[in-house]
Image (spheres, rainbow, N blue to C red):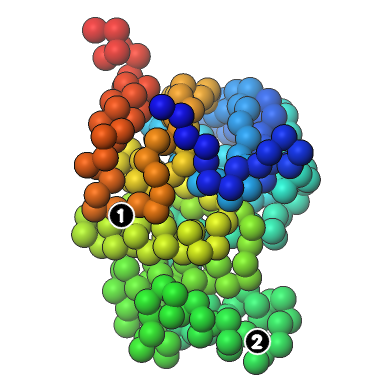
């Protein structure tokens, strides 16, 4: 069964994200490490892509290349049809690490990207109020990060990432350290926000269930130097309820294929 990803680009539309023959090598005193090797994939506007793979396979490296925080050794990285040659201010990047400013309240933290863009104060206030409501932080506007739970801090970081309305959203295991129940809550919130805004998303995770639950497509990376072992279209219709995805008839088939692609070569051949 095949699925057409939501709002995918047609042949006349430039991909929102494209990697062409991308290689990345890191060199240090201990030697040379080839992380990516001839990596190719495209992502249409409004598509939600998840990337899974073993630790060190280059998942975060791909996000850093798209963000313009690093440069490819070989090949070309494009975002919104343009080569990424410097820091990419057209994307939102939600990392694993909490980067809320401890001396600023929730509403002040969320406002930071708009303040840096010299947006009018009245507009900033209106947009902050709107996003606080969307991520479920009403009543906590004047709380400081130290007064928030882990889930609330993640919501505040997501709101700060979305406040300037970037067309492409990069997410590096944003829910990884959270407990299972809270993770489900935030996955549901993310799906709701994505459905309303239809951003192009590149979401890195180690969790196969999370990848199937959220994404239109899942890429499985091999150990480094990275190759794409599997490009899996997820045949589960939207809208999705995070508590019900694993009961969909297609879920088990997707899980088995993704797990088989992730298994170490020695185990697959045994």
Q: Residues within 10 Å of mark 1 (few under 14, many from 20)?
A: some
Kindly check if marks 1 and 2 are in contact, taking CB atoms under 8 A apart as contact. no
Q: Position of residue 131 (x, y in %)?
A: 50, 77
> Helix, strand or loop at disc 1?
loop
Q: Position of residue 151 (x, y in %)?
A: 32, 68
Using the image as rendered, state which of residue 191 and residue 31 is in the foreground: 191
* Residue 49 in sight: no
Pointer 2: what residue? 123
Q: Earlier in the sequence, mark 1 or mark 2?
A: 2
- Left/right of residue 90 with respect to residue 63 in the rendered view: right
Which residue is depicted at the point 53% across and 50% down? Answer: 201
* Residue 83 in sight: yes
Q: Position of residue 111 (x, y in %)?
A: 57, 80
For residue 1, above or below residue 131: above
Which residue is depicted at the point 32% across and 21% down? Answer: 260
User: From the image, which quarter does the N terminus lie in?
Assistant: top left
Using the image as rendered, state which of residue 26 and residue 53 is in the foreground: 53
Which residue is depicted at the point 68% across and 49% down? Answer: 68
User: From the image, which quarter does the C terminus lie in?
Assistant: top left
For residue 218, above or below residue 228: below
Pointer 1: what residue? 241
- Mark 1 or 2: in front is 1
> Helix, strand or loop at disc 2?
helix
The label number, if any, that marks residue 117 in the structure image: none
Q: Position of residue 113 (x, y in %)?
A: 62, 74
Q: In which image quadrant can residue 121 be found?
A: bottom right
Q: CA distance from mark 1 to mark 2?
A: 33 Å
Q: Residues within 10 Å of mark 2 (few under 14, many from 20)?
A: few
């Amino acid at each position: 069964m095949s699925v057409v990803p939501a709002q995918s680009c047609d042949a006349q539309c430039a991909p929102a994200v494209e990697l062409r023959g991308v290689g990345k090598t890191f060199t240090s005193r201990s030697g040379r490490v080839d992380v990516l090797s001839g990596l190719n994939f495209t992502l249409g506007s409004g598509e939600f892509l998840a990337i899974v793979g073993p630790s060190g396979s280059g998942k975060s490296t791909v996000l850093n290349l798209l963000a313009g925080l690093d440069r490819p050794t070989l090949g070309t990285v494009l975002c919104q049809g343009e080569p990424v040659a410097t820091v990419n201010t057209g994307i939102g990047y939600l990392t694993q690490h909490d980067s809320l400013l401890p001396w600023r309240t929730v509403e002040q933290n969320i406002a930071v990207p708009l303040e840096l863009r010299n947006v009018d104060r009245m507009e900033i206030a209106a947009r902050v109020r709107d996003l606080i409501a969307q991520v479920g932080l009403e009543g906590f506007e004047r709380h400081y990060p130290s007064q928030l739970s882990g889930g609330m801090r993640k919501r505040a970081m997501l709101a700060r990432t979305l406040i300037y309305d970037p067309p492409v959203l990069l997410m590096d295991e944003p829910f990884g350290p959270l407990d299972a129940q809270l993770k489900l809550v935030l996955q549901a919130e993310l799906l709701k926000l994505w459905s309303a805004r239809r951003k192009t998303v590149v979401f890195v995770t180690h969790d196969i269930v999370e990848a199937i639950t959220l994404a239109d497509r899942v890429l499985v990376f091999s150990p480094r130097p990275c190759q794409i072992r599997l490009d899996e279209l997820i045949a589960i219709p939207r809208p999705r309820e995070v508590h019900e995805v694993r009961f969909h008839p297609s879920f088990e088939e997707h899980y088995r294929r993704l797990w088989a692609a992730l298994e170490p070569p020695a185990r697959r051949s045994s």
